Amino acid sequence: MVVSEKSKEMNRRLDEAVHYLEHTISGRPDVAVVLGSGLGGLSEYMEDAGCIDYMEIPAWPKASAMVEGHAGKMHHGKIGAHRVAVLAGRFHLYEGHPIEDVVFPMRVMGQLGVRLLVVTNAAGGINPDLSPGDLMLIRDHVGLQGVSPLEGDLPEGTPGRFVDMTQAYDRELGECMREVASVQGLKLAEGVYASMRGPQYETPAEVRMLRAFGIDAVGMSTVPEVIAAQHMGMRVVGVSCITNAAAGVSPSPLSHEEVISVGAKSGAFLARLIYRFLDVLPEI
């Protein structure tokens, strides 16, 4: 089998990043957490904690500046029985990153031995029952970004590209998350998330279309990461923080400042939820 030059380059970059992290962080992580816009605070709950700037990791995707609300740092440490890597900042298609860079952190996490991905995002609420500040467990998703991390060249040695997405979000772990939220007295809605390419927000007509399709919340991320995680055999749990009502649902204009502001207020609740979830979660 002939391996393309692009696949070889992907493997070279992955090897560099994995080698660096193996010798820098305290223990191989079995859990990775991706934090969405404005969401943070989870590192405060971690024991034996450390932090690495993305710019320090060899072969890691580079950007002149992370999107506001994305710190561009990897926190690492321990929560309960788990070694955890927290990615405070992600890469988006709308920044001009190719799809292989958008999911590069997930592939690195997979090679480090991560078995569970907890993915979070800031999202606009389409379901009228959702209000800014609410948390929504992602039951399923609809990808509308027009690209897949499984198309084209893949890193050498990866599984076949035809991945079953019937249970993209682990139902058993999702139920565990719901139980943890209930014990904390924390409202946790449940719904379907859709990813658009952005960076512009959706039009009211697009939101009406999404609502007709049964979509509860919409954002500009997450789906490529979940596909890549499934490709590498990870289990996935996802939570959206509803930071605003989608266009046409509320008469107010949309702004990134509102997303960051509401995310910062709700981030503490989300961090506590993820901490309690991982603290009670047995070995995966």
Image (spheres, rainbow, N blue to C red):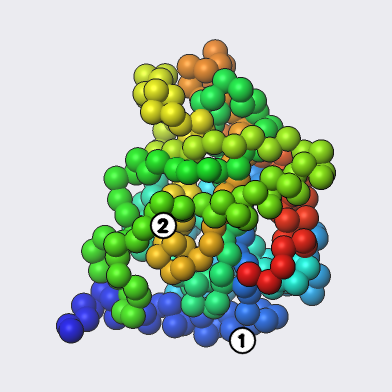
Evaluate whether residue 157 shows in this view.
yes
Disc 1 residue crowd, few under 14, some 14–19, many 20+, Cα 10 Å: few
Question: Which dot marks residue 281?
Answer: none
Q: Residue furthest top?
A: 251
Task: Please tell me how crowded label 2 is: few (under 14), some (14-19), or many (20+) other residues with Cα within 10 Å.
Answer: many
Say if 65 sits above or below 182 in the image.
Answer: below
Look at the image and tell me in which quarter the N terminus lies.
Answer: bottom left
Circle on res. 227: 2
Find residue 167 and report its horizontal and vertical position in percent: 46, 53
Q: Nearer the viewer, mark 2 or mark 1?
A: 2
Q: In the rendered view of the protein, which quadrant contains the C terminus?
A: bottom right
Residue 61 seen:
no
Mark 2 or mark 1, earlier in chain: 1
* Marks 2 and 1 in Cβ contact (< 8 Å): no
Residue 204 shown left or right of residue 45 in the figure: left
Check disc 2 and give the amino acid type.
Ile
- Specify the quadrant of the image occupied by residue 89: bottom right
Coordinates of residue 268 in the picture (x, y in percent): 76, 45
Q: Which residue lies at the image location 53% right of the left edge and 43% below the top edge?
A: 139
Residue appearing at x 61%, y 59% in the figure: 33
Q: SS class of the residue under badge 2?
A: helix
Percent x, y of residue 111: 49, 77
The x, y position of residue 196, in whole percent, is 39, 39
Q: Which residue is mark 1?
A: 23
Q: Secondary structure at mark 1?
A: loop
Q: Report, in whole angstroms, how far the alpha carbon at label 2 lies from the one at label 1.
A: 28 Å
Q: Is residue 232 above or below residue 236?
A: below
- Name the residue type under label 1: His
Residue depicted at x 38% and y 28%: 213
Could you tell me which residue is drawn at 76 percent across and 67 percent down? 79
Q: How many marks?
A: 2
Q: Is residue 275 left or right of residue 130?
A: right
